[in-house]
Amino acid sequence: MLNPTGKSILFIDEIHRFNKLQQDALLPYVENGTIILIGATTENPYFEVNKALISRSMVIKLEPLTQNDIFKILKNALTNKEGLRRLQHKNRR
């Protein structure tokens, strides 16, 4: 996938399953900006992901949605003419 700047975006799910050698192979491309790496893990990235990759990363912890969050999303989808599209537009601002 290319982003608007033309750089490749590489998404790796369960990046903690990559061994050190595999993670090291990504490093030069992350460093020189050839790729924008997005890695997802259910493990603690500070223990499971190569320190060199972590030092060049922004770690974002996602929290689960609450029942109230899900209720608001579903209510919005059912009551608004634009459904979920309205929610997407609101988050862009």
Image (cartoon, rainbow, N blue to C red):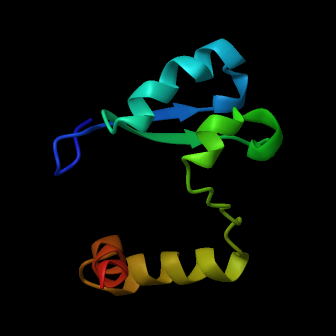
Q: Quadrant of residue 82?
A: bottom left
Can residue 77 be seen from the camera position used here? yes
Residue 14 showing in the rendered view: no
Q: Quadrant of residue 28?
A: top left
Q: Whole-percent x and y of residue 13?
A: 58, 33
Residue at the (78%, 34%) spot, across then down: 48
How many marks the image carries: the answer is 0
The x and y percentages for residue 51 are 70, 38
Residue farthest to the top? 21
Query: Toward the viewer: 89 or 28?
Result: 28
Is 37 placed left or right of 68 in the picture? left
| Residue at image point 27% right, 35% down | 1
Question: Is residue 61 depicted above or below 68 in this figure?
Answer: above
Tell me if 39 is positioned left or right of 84 in this view.
Answer: right
Q: Is residue 9 left or right of residue 12?
A: left
Residue 10: x percent and y percent? Answer: 40, 33
Residue at 78% in and 45% down? 46
The residue positioned 30% from the left and 33% from the top of the image is 34
> Along the line of sight, which residue is nearer the eye, 20 or 76?
20
- Image quadrant assignment for residue 81: bottom left
Q: Quadrant of the C terminus?
A: bottom left
Residue 56 locus on image (x, y percent): 54, 46
Name above or below for residue 7 compared with residue 81. Answer: above
